[in-house]
Amino acid sequence: MTYGTDQLFEEVSYVAYHFHWPFDQILDLEHPVRREFVRRIGAINTAINATAESSDGGDGRPAEVVDVIASGSAGQWW
């Protein structure tokens, strides 16, 4: 079974857009690691969107997102 080219480009584009990493660096990631980055970016975006109308944390991000990032509860990928 081969991994679909369209799916690969979607993942690489998604990670590149959010992390500003070069194409080659993202392609060098093992597939499960790249998928984990995609999953975590999605979770961060979901949290931001869910709290977009909440109080501001002072830096333009909702306070709840700042708390999640600061606490480390978003997890570690390594």
Image: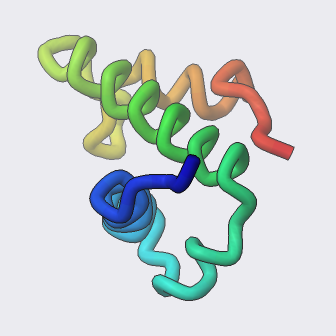
| Residue at image coords 51%, 33% | 39
Q: Residue 55's spot in the image, x, y percent?
A: 24, 16
| Location of residue 52 (image quadrant) | top left
Against 36, is 56 above or below? above
Residue 6's quadrant in the figure?
bottom left
Image point 57% across, 72% down: which residue? 26
Quadrant of the image occupied by residue 57:
top left
Extreme residue in the left direction:
53
Residue under the point 63% across and 39% down: 36
Q: Which is nearer the eye, 71 or 22?
A: 22
Q: Along the horizontal axis of the image, is 44 left or right of 54?
A: right
- Residue 35 appears left or right of 58: right
> At which x and y percent is residue 12?
42, 65
Query: How was this image coloured?
Result: rainbow
As drawn, the residue found furthest toward the right would be 78
Q: Would you place residue 8 above or below residue 44 in this image?
A: below
x then y, percent, for residue 56 = 26, 26
Left or right of 13? Residue 34 is right
73 vs 4, nearest the viewer: 4
Q: In which quarter of the image is the C terminus?
A: top right
The residue lying at 57 percent from left, 43 percent from top is 35
Tell me if residue 16 comes above or below residue 49 in the rendering. Answer: below
Q: Is residue 49 above or below residue 8?
A: above
Total labels: the figure holds 0
* Residue furthest out toward the front: 1
**Is 21 positioned to the left or the right of 16 in the image?**
right
x and y, in percent, of residue 77 in the image: 77, 41
**Camera-side residue of 6 and 47:** 6
